[in-house]
Image (cartoon, grey):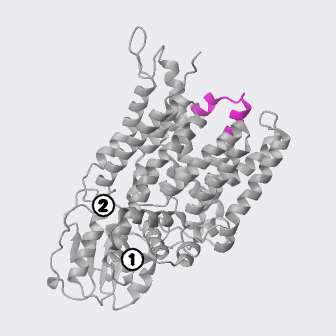
Amino acid sequence: MVEYREPHALRICLLIATAAVIQAWTLRHHEARLPDALRSIQQAEQIAQGDWRSGVMQGLDHPLHPLGIVAARQIVGGEGPIAWQRAALAVAFGCVILWVVPLYLLAWEATDSKAAWLGCLMMAANPLVGQLVVNGLSETTFLLFWTSGLWAALRFLREGRLRWLSATLGLSVLGYLARPEGLLLPLSLILVLLILPLHRSTRILWPRWRRAVAALALGSLALAGPFMAIKGGPGTRPAVARVLGLAPSVPPDAPEREQPAETGRTPLQIHRDSLSRVVAAVTGVVTPALLPFALLGVLQGGFGDPAQSRRLLFQAILLLAAGVGLVRLHATGGYCTTRHGLIPGMILVLQSAGGIHQLMRRISIRGTWLGMATERLVPGTAVWGMIVVLVLGLPRLVETSIRVPGPFSAYRDAAIWINQSLPPDEPLLDLTGWALYLSGRDGYGFSEIGQALADPQTRWILARGAHLEGDWSDCRTLRRILEHRRPVAAFPPAPAPGRVQLLLFDRGGPSSEIPSPVRSEGPLITIR
């Protein structure tokens, strides 16, 4: 008797090709809006110059993503800021494409194997993932290793073999070296192991349980402990200390907040508002329409199988831990964006794929994968899955179908114009960060806005519209300084709806002496 095997390799190859097409399309139709990747690039430059202490040990961000940029820079080639920018995008693009492999394996392990392709496709086509690539963010590197570690953890809970636990440890530590959230995986697994003996349906053999607890605790300490000791804690970002209660919350009018907070709120009101914001962030990843399917996927998984019960318990604890961390992030730091809800959103999306598959399997009488029945054509899982993807993704696809010269074209045009037109000795306040970096000039960034506005020598101010419209004290000061002044240059001069536009203001000299903006030729970004 020949054992039937699922064509997993073929499905993964098709999903990788699909993800590559989606991300390539995204790079041509979206623009970068976040300056976070600039820190990783600057750390990568320090590492490339041999300053490992500053670039790896003392950097604000964890070092794995900058190290990836250094490696990609050797492949991409070129010199100067543009080469580093291309390397950052190459790392993000490559990591998301490779992420398809552990994502499919995770979906296969967490749900029915026939629904794995659907969950993987829904995540690969998620607009949030495209934004991570366009902005070159460290979440792309983090997802590759952390998702692999999560899959290995589920395999361990199903089989109980220590080799899967060792893989979980190694991959989760790599995820931690990309972002501090990597610690969420081993900590949640330790908590699960402590709960397993409390009920007979989830217990594992006692000798194996003791070895697993010891290996997980000692292994996490041995692998991540030295880096934490050098860093002086789980991470050097202020947000990490605030979430853990090691640092006070930011002031109500701090610029890192999404919006200024009301004064005099009680802790209960603060955490209630934070919970609402976290729910909005998570539903930005997994739309509310998918939540009933996620619940159906969990219920269809069943609780009679001990291995399945352990895996469901682990996912529930992981969701709870991530939710508590996000609530603390917003309560203490005043922000929680959609990309912060990626971990719980990913788990819910994969579960919703399992729910869709289970429902369609019941509806499609005698239907095969594509829906071809013996007597008539009925919708199969693949047909319904494609309908779900189109319904969820088509509106956003239409909204963002603008062709742009590249994710950083506006910033590069501004940098070229600034170098050609402005005196090199006059300081510039660049609230975007990117144009200042690409121009190679000295000046002030967003974090130095107060110092820049207090400096009477700061004549030139480059900003986006959002920087001028906020209700923060720095925005109000900026509006007061620029009152009744028109921008002397705009990049691009006439943007299409939804495109990024940079505005350059002159605090001092006559604007009539400033030439018109110029546009650089050719696309900015290529992935080789």
Left or right of 21 on screen, residue 238:
right
* Residue 170 placement (x, y as % from top left): 64, 54
Region of the chain picked out in magenta, as a range? 297-311
Residue 337 in percent (x, y) is at 49, 57
Q: Using a 10 Å C-alpha cutoff, classify the residue at mark 2 as few (fewer than 14 neighbours), some (14 to 19) or many (20 or more).
A: many
The image shows a total of numbered marks equal to 2
Which element type, helix, strand or loop, lies under badge 2? loop
Looking at the rendered structure, the secondary structure element under dot 1 is: helix
Q: Residue at x 58, y 68 (%)?
A: 239
Q: Which residue is mark 1?
A: 476
Label disc, if present, on residue 179 of the rendered structure? none
Foreground residue among 294 and 272: 294
The residue positioned 34% from the left and 56% from the top of the image is 527
Above/below status of 39 relative to 161: below
Q: In the rendered structure, which amino acid carries the disc numbered 1?
A: Arg
Q: Residue 53 lies in magenta, yes or no?
A: no
Estimate the spatial distance between the alpha carbons at disc 2 and disc 1, rounded to whole Å.
35 Å
Q: Is residue 273 left or right of residue 39?
A: right
Task: Please give the residue where the numbered disc 2 appears in the rendered image.
Answer: 525
- Which percent across, then down, holds residue 36? 45, 67
Indicate the amino acid at tag 2. Answer: Ile
- Count neighbours of disc 1 (C-alpha within 10 A) and say few if under 14, some if 14 to 19, many if 20 or more: some
Position of the C terminus, as image quadrant, is bottom left
